[in-house]
Amino acid sequence: MGQKVSLREYARMRGVRLNAVQTAVNSGRIHKTPDGKIDVEEANKEWFMNTDPAKSRKADPLFETSDGGGMPKNGMSNFQQAKTADIYYRAMLAKAKLKMITGETIDRKKAGLHAFNLGRSLRDLFVSFPTRYGALIAAALETDEHKTVVVLDEYIRKLLSESKDVIDREL
């Protein structure tokens, strides 16, 4: 964990407006810590990995060129800057690949597919419950089998509908 700062302070550090940081947080390009702060080191990595440079209005402050006087702000020539940027980007990609190989991170599409399949399987189990166990429950309660199955089916579908609303709110 690195230094934790407020959204406003992080915007100042990056040289962008507060609403740019808020937009990045809302769109999921960077994440806040549970206490609502920004972990600078983690956010810088996420900003770099998840921001399309073609959509940026400003260059990354790390690689800014000159201030109009001909000499670059950071004292490097354009070639040195390009080489530094290339090395930096390659290192970030290598680090991301290493995390994938070691299992520290997982493929987002695979995780989403797994969650979808798990949800589908659970839904199918719930929907088949009245048909599979309705007769047994009716026999135990000494009630009409058909009516028991219909009531169970109605309430299970209501439960699934409510759970869909809860999931939609959470996502």
Image (cartoon, rainbow, N blue to C red):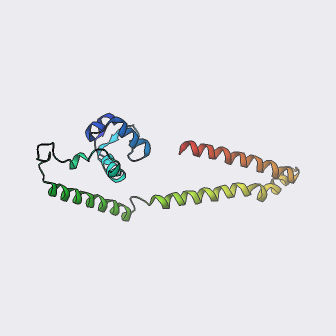
Residue projecting furthest to the bottom: 101
Question: Relative to the observer, which residue lies in front, 76 or 54?
Answer: 54
Identify the image quadrant of residue 103: bottom left
How far across and down, in percent of the image, does residue 131 sit? Answer: 78, 58
User: Is 13 rendered above or below residue 135?
Assistant: above
* Residue found 35% across the figure and 52% down from its top: 52
Identify the image quadrant of residue 16: top left
Question: Relative to the observer, which residue lies in front, 34 or 77?
Answer: 77
Q: Visible in this render: residue 33?
A: no
* Residue found 22% across the figure and 56% down from its top: 85
Question: Relative to the observer, which residue lies in front, 32 or 1?
Answer: 32
How far across and down, in percent of the image, does residue 49 sit? Answer: 34, 53
* Residue found 83% across the figure and 56% down from its top: 135
Q: Visible in this render: residue 75?
A: yes
Q: Is residue 33 left or right of residue 14?
A: right
Identify the image quadrant of residue 61: top left
Question: Relative to the observer, which residue lies in front, 140 or 95?
Answer: 95
* Residue found 86% across the figure and 53% down from its top: 146
Q: Is residue 90 left or right of residue 71?
A: right
Q: Is residue 15 left or right of residue 104?
A: left
User: Is 131 rendered above or below residue 164?
Assistant: below
Q: Is residue 135 left or right of residue 158?
A: right
